[in-house]
Image (spheres, grey):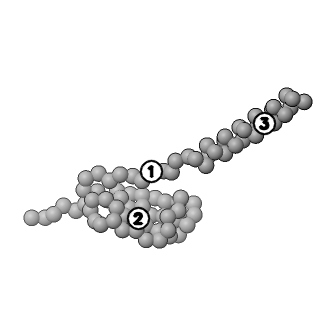
Amino acid sequence: MKKRVRNAVVAALLTVAGTTAVVASPAQALPYPNDNESITIIYYSDATRTVQVGMHVYGNCLEDFQYGIRTSYSTWSRTACPRDLP
């Protein structure tokens, strides 16, 4: 009987520990722009990535810009800043 109770307690603790590990996982970091680059992140409504719901542009080319909502479904790209012409 004691062994059965101990096994149940261990199983419950392992379940809680596994759930905590999943919930406490860190968020994905935003990419860092290099000199003369900007990063554009486009957010989509779902995994099909067909309906855009937000955008975030940041870096060294333009002022930071964002609109809409951020979701876990996104794509990002780097854009080189145009060079000043003499």
* Residue 77: assigned label: none
> Vertically, is 55 above or below 20?
below
List the residue tagged with mark 3: 9
Q: Which numbered disc flags the more N-terminal residue, 1 or 3?
A: 3
Q: Quadrant of the N terminus?
A: top right
Q: Quadrant of the C terminus?
A: bottom left
> Mark 3: which amino acid?
Val
- Disc 3 packing (10 Å; few <14; some 14–19; many ≥20): few
Left or right of 11 in this view: 64:
left
Left or right of 44 in this view: 66:
left
Left or right of 20 in this view: 3:
right
Mark 1 residue element: loop
List the residue tagged with mark 2: 56
> Mark 2: which amino acid?
His
List the residue tagged with mark 1: 29
Mark 2 residue element: strand
- Disc 2 packing (10 Å; few <14; some 14–19; many ≥20): some
The image position of residue 60, as x and y in percent, is 27, 59
- Disc 1 packing (10 Å; few <14; some 14–19; many ≥20): few
Residue name at image x 25 percent, y 53 percent? 35
Question: What distance separates the C-alpha of mark 1 from that of mark 2?
Answer: 14 Å
Q: Which numbered disc flags the more N-terminal residue, 3 or 2?
A: 3
Q: Total label count?
A: 3
